[in-house]
Amino acid sequence: MILAFGFIALGVVVVVCVLAIRRFSRSVEEEEADRILRAEYDKYSQNIGES
Amino acid sequence: MQTIVSRLFDFVGPRAASPDFLKDESSSHKLLATAVAALLALGASAMWGVVVGAHGHLSIANVLTVPMLITASALASLPLALFVAKLTSSSLRVTDLLLAYVSSAFAGCTALLLLSPLVAIYQQSSSLVGSAVGPASAFLAFVVGAAVFVRANAKLVGRGASAGALIVPVVLLVLLQGAAIVQLASLSHPLFGQRTSIGHGIDALSQPSSESQEP
C-alpha cells in the first residue's frame, strides 16, 4: 500500500517537474527579454538626455 | 537548460559566492533549477538502479523502485523540515531551502550514478565484497548529498538566514530522510538481488545475523 503511494507520488512529482520546467522556462525567457529591453531603453533614454 | 545545469553545479560546488539566480528576486529561476535538478536526480538514481540490479528482471523494476524510494522518503521528510524551518527562521525562504535540498539530492544521485560501474564490476566478480558494495555506494552517495546540503545551506546563511535557525531543519531533514529511505527499502523488493542488512530497515538492529537468513 505504502509502495503504491510511493509510485503514485513519483508519477506526480515527475509530471509536476515537467510542467514546472515548461512553465518557468517561459517565465525566465520573458524575464530575460524584459531585462534586455529595459537595459536598451535605459541606454536609449540616457543618450537622449545627453544629446 | 545548459545554463541551468551549469548554475546548479555552481550552487553545489565549492564556490563561496551564490550564483546569480539566488540573488534574483524572482523565484522563477530557482523553481526552474529545482525542477531540472529533481528530474536529473531521479534519472540518475534510475540508471544506478539499472546498473546495480542487473540480474534479469530486477534491473527493470529498479528503474522505478529507486526513484520511488528517493521521492517517497523526500515527501515523508521534507514537509516537516520545511515547517520547522519556517518556525525557526523568519528570513529563510522555502524556495531557497527547497533548491538547496533538491540540488544536494542531484549531487548525491550523480555520485550514485558515477559509482554504479564500480558497483556492478564488484557485484559480478567478487564474493568477498560483492554484496556489500551496493549498500556502501548508496551510503556514500547519501553522505555526499548530506554534505552538499549542509554547504548549500551555508550559502543561504550568507543571504540573511541565520546559521542557528538552519541547523535544526537541516539535521532533521537528513535524519528523517535516512530513516524513511531505510524503512521504505525494507518494504520494496531487494534492489541488489538479495536483501542486505540495510534492506531490513530498523528491524536489522534486533536481527544482526538476518542477512544470512533471508535470500
Image (cartoon, grey):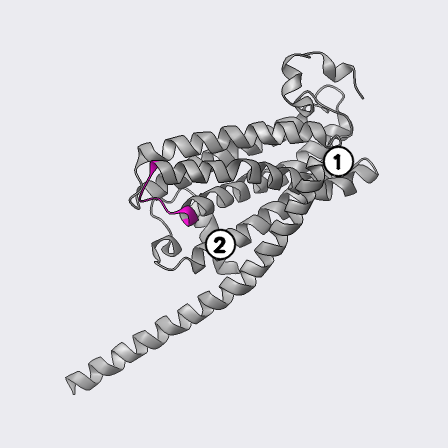
- Residue B170 seen in the figure: yes
Residue B63 figure quarter: top right
* Image spot of residue B172 (x, y percent): 46, 30
- Residue B114 seen in the figure: no
Q: Residue at the spot x=49%, y=31% of the render?
A: B174
Q: Residue at the spot x=53%, y=64% of the render?
A: A23
Residue B24 figure quarter: bottom left
- Span of residues in magenta: B88-95
- Vertical arrangement, residue A19 with respect to residue B186, above or below: below
Q: Which residue is mark 2?
A: B33
Left or right of B155 on screen, residue B105: right
The chain letter for the residue carrying disc 2 is B
* Image spot of residue B171 (x, y percent): 44, 29
Residue lying at the far bottom of the rendered structure: A51
Left or right of B148 on screen, residue A9: right
Residue lying at the far left of the rendered structure: A50
Left or right of A50 on screen, residue A17: right
* Image spot of residue B106 (x, y percent): 54, 44
Q: Residue at the spot x=50%, y=40% of the render?
A: B79
The N terminus of chain A - image quarter: top right
Q: Which residue is mark 1?
A: B53
Residue B151 figure quarter: top left
User: In this view of the protein, which residue sits in the foreground, B168 or B80?
Assistant: B80
> Callout 1: 10 Å neighbours few (<14), some, many (20+)?
many
Magenta-drawn stretch, dominant element (helix, strand or loop): loop
User: Is residue B8 located in the magenta-colored stretch of the structure?
Assistant: no
Q: Amino acid at mark 1?
A: Gly
Q: Amino acid at mark 2?
A: Ala
Left or right of B68 on screen, residue B32: left
